[in-house]
Image: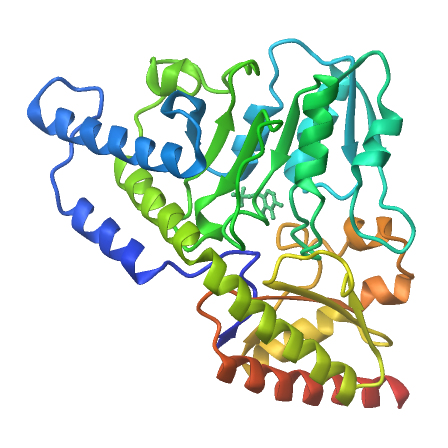
Amino acid sequence: MIYLDNNATTLIDPEVAEVIKSHTELMLGNASSLHSSGRKARALLVEARQTIASLLCVTSEQLCFTSSATEAMNLLLNVKRTPKHIISSSLEHAATLSALQRLETKGSRISYLAPLEGSGSITANQIESEIRDDTELLVIMGANNETGIKNDLSSIAALAERVGIPLVVDGVALFGKEPFTLPSGVHGFCFSGHKIHGPKGIALAVIRNGYSVEPLIVGGPQQFMRRAGTEDVVAIVAFAKAVALAIEKSAESQIRMAFLRDQFEAALVERLPNVLIHGRDESRVANVSNISFLGIDGESLVITLDLAGVAVSHGSACSSGALEPSHVLSSMGLSREAVRGAIRFSLSRFTTEEEISRALILVVEQVKRLLVGTAL
Ligand code: PLP
């Protein structure tokens, strides 16, 4: 199987798998217990927390481990005082959109910015012109999970800092894909273990000083009272390893993935008559290529490619299966035909040149076959 669905989830890095194995074999106690096996667990937890904190240039107390980025985003938007007006975008992931809807039911007014015509991103200027006297929160993703198109985080964070409005950023599709520094204007940030070759079931919310959230889960005093419940120390230690590897390898893998993606896109344009590449001239993370094959049903192509041995996705992973047109591509103003025929190819640092060459042959073969089918 050629796996090109790395924005849905990634394979575990063998070095991370080794950490899981070696730590599962230890008799680790509850990190809140006083005895030696509890203290051992606590020491590992503290160390993992410090490792991630220093890699992100934040403090340990600003980190809250969660079960998923969905939970992290829900936590980041479970603000102590309901914001009067929030600025966000129509491009956000369902986790963000649903958490925002909940804030709407509590009285928040939300402006959902759509990308400017012909683009797939939200600019700092757009946000600035939407700011009102009662705007109290900005919620903008770092990169889009379906298209890979980035929002200019440094200028958005600079704006947030200048106007003194907290900014929450979904970093899931951005973190680990390229070298990254968390801008000082970002108050809340999150990403997920399973998108960076780490374990599933573990993610992170960064909550900077001055931004307050209410816990979603209450009980014991774990995680500085932000998320009660016994910590999964093995998952957290493995996650810390995945974060360290993602950062260490980000520059090299960005270059490799961009090279493979660009080769793949150029070859498809050359060999097929019906290809529309989204965001090709925009600033994108290197691992995503979102392509519409005009005249073809994307769902059918996903299935035929699967049978041929290539895993890709149509729409976002979480909404695929729902048979709903992608809200991201729709809000970019694409035609129904382009949205219907869109496929997301997402690479990882483990994707090889051979896999891309083979995938290219199979995609061309299957698209031609489906095109003939529609012409009959
Ligand atoms: N945000 C983005 C941009 C995503 O792509 C995803 C998952 O696809 C999520 C949030 C949710 O992440 P998780 O699967 O960890 O809940």
Q: Is residue 97 visible?
A: no
- Decide if residue 16 is on the left or right side of residue 338: left
Where is residue 275, by image quadrant?
Answer: bottom right
Residue 144 higher or lower than 251, as above or below:
above
Q: Quadrant of ligand 1?
A: top right
Where is residue 363, by image quadrant?
Answer: bottom right
Front-most of 337 and 322? 337
- Name the residue located 41 percent from the left edge and 55 percent from the top edge: 197
Q: Position of residue 233 (x, y in %)?
A: 27, 35
Front-most of 21 and 157? 157
Q: Position of residue 69 (x, y in %)?
A: 53, 38
Image quadrant where one finds the C terminus: bottom right
Q: Position of residue 61 (x, y in %)?
A: 39, 20
- Decide if residue 117 is on the left or right side of residue 61: right
Residue 94 higher or lower than 49, as above or below:
below
What residue occupies the far top of the structure in this picture?
81
What residue occupies the far left of the structure in this picture?
36
- Decide if residue 260 is on the left or right side of residue 11: right
- Name the residue located 67 percent from the left edge and 31 percent from the top edge: 157
Q: Is residue 133 visible?
A: yes
- Name the residue located 59 percent from the left edge and 73 percent from the top edge: 259
- Decide if residue 14 is on the left or right side of residue 116: left
Coloring scheme used: rainbow
- Name the residue located 78 percent from the left edge and 47 percent from the top edge: 121
Circle count: 0
Where is residue 271, by image quadrant?
Answer: bottom right
Q: Position of residue 246 (x, y in %)?
A: 42, 53
Front-most of 20 and 119? 119
